[in-house]
Structures are given as C-alpha cells and as structure tokens.
Image (tube, helix red, strand yellow):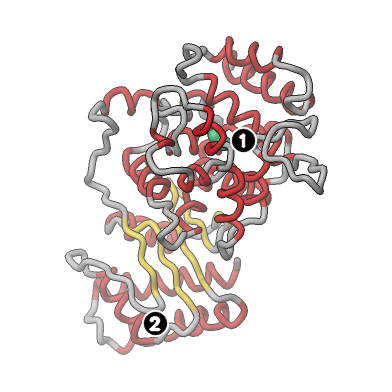
Amino acid sequence: MELSKGFISVFMSAISNCMLYSKNHAFIDELIEKAFSKLGVFLKEKDHFEMMIIENDLIINKNPAIGIGLQGKNLMKRLKRKGISHIEFSKGITLQELKKLVADISNMGKELKSTPHIKIGIVDLHFGFTIDGDSSTEKSLSCFTSEQLKKIEEEVNSISPFKEFHVAGFEEIVFQFVLMLKKKIDILKLLRPVRAYNGLDYNHATNVAVLTLFQAQALGIKEEFHRDIGLAALLHDVGKLFVQKGMHKKESSLGLKESEAMKLHPFYGAQYLAKINDLTYLAPIVAFQHHLRYDGRGYPQLKTINMKQHICSQMTAISDSFDNLRITTPYRRALDVKDALVTMKTKDEGLFNPFLIDNFIRSIHLALSG
Ligand SMILES: [Fe+2]
Ligand SMILES: [Fe+2]
C-alpha cells in the first residue's frame, strides 16, 4: 500500500501543478516521470493498478486506502468532479499515456477517454435515475444514490451470454454494499422492490447479495472473503438468462414443461460463470447449489456425486428464499418481513442450515429493533 500511496501523492502533485503551470513545464515532466516509475515498479509484479471511488472512499487495488493524505483526498475530489469512478492502469503503459491523462484531468473542460493501457470508468453525475417512472418511491426505499442505482442497473442488465463479462463493475457494486453495511444502515432500507418473480431481476440479485453479505457480517466471517461472497450471491440467478427466451419474464404461473426448463438455470449459470476469468470460484458453486437443500435434496441433483451444499450457497439460499417470500406470486401474496421470517423458520426441516437460519432471523430482528 505504501508504494500505491506514493504513486497517488506524486500523481496528484503533477495534476495540481499542471493546473498552475503549462503542461510542458520541466517540473511537471519530472513529477510525471516519478509517478511513472512508481507505477512501473508496481506493474512489474501485477498486471493492473486500479483506483476506484466508492462514496467517499478511495479503493486502491481492491483495498480501502487509509491515510491517503491531502493529495489523495484532492485526487478523489478532482476525479469526482469529472465524474470518474474508476481508473485502471495496465502493464505496457507509456509515459505519453500518463502525461496525457495528467493533462486531461487538470483541464476541467476536457473529456477523459480511455487509452490502450488506461481504462477510465465514468459515471454521469448529473443524471437522475428512475425505475418505472416513480423516482420518489425508489428514493425513499433506498439508501443508494441515484448514480449508484444507475450503475447497479446497468451492470446487472449488461450480463449477456453474447457479451464479455466485466468483473470489475460487479466488484464495485459489492464494495458499495460492504461499505453500506459497515455504516450500519438499516438492512431493510437496502432492499429494493422486486418486480418479476421469475426473472433475472436486478433488484432481486442485489437484494440477495446485500442479505448474504449481511449474514456474513453477522457471522463474523473475515472481511477478506466478503468480496467473493457478495459477487457469488449477486450472480446466483444468472443462469435464468439462458432459459428459454421470454419465460423468465412471465408473470403468470409456469407450466410443467416451463418449470422443468427453469430448473436448469443453476446448471446454465454455473457453466457460464465457470468460464469467466478473474471471477471467484464461489460464483459457479453458488449458482449451481442455491436451490439445493441443506439435507442434500433439492435441485439439480448429480447421479454420481452426493453433493454437500457450500456454506456460501447455504447463506445465499436463505437470502434468496427471504427475498422471494416478499414478492407476490400466482400462488400467494407477498409476505411482510415478520411473516416471511416465521415462514422460513417453520418450513420443513432440512431446508436450511439450522445455525444459519437462526443467525439470519436473529440478525434481522436485531436490525428491526435497532
Ligand atoms: Fe434461482
Ligand atoms: Fe434467486
């Protein structure tokens, strides 16, 4: 982290000076060269150097940068003002590319564009976000800013069997959830209304991720695992994209054939996620196992292996069930939080890990009373 902080400090120093002097000033060249050499040392070991801004935190290479000093804070301010949420430097970067970036950041009127070795992530800071045209309800139900909601919707909706999957965007979402939960924000305020009970609804995906991270936090699972747990939970239903077109959006009850086809989504999801580089190994496991039961029943079943559900799949199954009970389906009305918890507790034995379901119910009650 010291090397990263050193880079941030010189990098911002170059930007500040570039705002005061001409971009061709020798002093600025010197600073950029210094920053370039620090970046080079880092990129000898790793393929990427990544900076992300989430809320008021600067995340460097997936770790919150603590004690970044005035230069770090100024850099965050500067990037935020330009609507930049993410910069990734990769191996092979040239001094010219870094010089151009410094000059463009220091020029307020200049729009930033990615170059071959510098990837820029931009958020539209001036764009209000609505879902189904009702912004007031959405805002009151959520602790997320409109920019965060927009980003989440875009990322989840961007998943497609025909497009390349970008892990970084999803990691950013999970970081946001982790930070929100750390702030002890009411868990129920982080949950969002789900529209389609069969669908790959991004609200359902994010609810399941938030609820699973909430469980992980309540269980005291080490923070270093939260990223992987959150990602796996977020992507648990991705296989629904591969189920026959149109069916996953159906509001009425599914026919027998359709139900059987829908039951293949864990299999499709696992197959898809297993092929993605840089994604946690937990993602295909959770996608495959989230409809398994604690007692080993459920689906899908493998003829040759008697599968034991992974603890992350067990937590995801609990979050999934809770979120599903809060949606109206053709078979029953939506349940409120307390009824949903009672239903889960009294459901047949063997469905959930008894320790985990008790932890979940206790933690939700605690959140409700706090
Ligand atoms: Fe599912
Ligand atoms: Fe689900």
The front one of 218 and 315 is: 315
User: Ligand 2 shows up in which quadrant of the image?
Assistant: top right
In screen coordinates, is 115 left or right of 216? Answer: left
Tell me how many marks there are.
2
Q: From where the camera sits, is residue 327 visible?
A: yes
| Residue 32: assigned label | 2
Please rate how many residues cluster around mark 2, counting C-alpha atoms within 10 Å: few if below 14, some from 14 to 19, many from 20. Answer: many
Q: Residue at x 49, y 66 (%)?
A: 50
Task: Name which residue lies at 56% across and 49% down.
Answer: 268
Q: Crowding near pointer 1: few (<14 within 10 Å), some, many (20+)?
A: many
The dot on residue 242 is: none
Going by the image, does 332 lie left or right of 291?
left
Lateral position of residue 216 relative to residue 258, left or right: right
**In the image, residue 318 lies at what x, y percent?**
65, 28
Lower position in the chain sequence, tag 2 or tag 1: 2
Residue 181 in sight from this viewpoint = no
Residue type beneath disc 1? Thr
Which secondary structure, mark 1?
helix
Q: Observer-nearest residue: 257 or 281?
A: 257
- Look at mark 1 in the image and give the residue it sits on: 212
Relative height, residue 354 to residue 177 (above, below):
above
Callout 2, which amino acid?
Ile
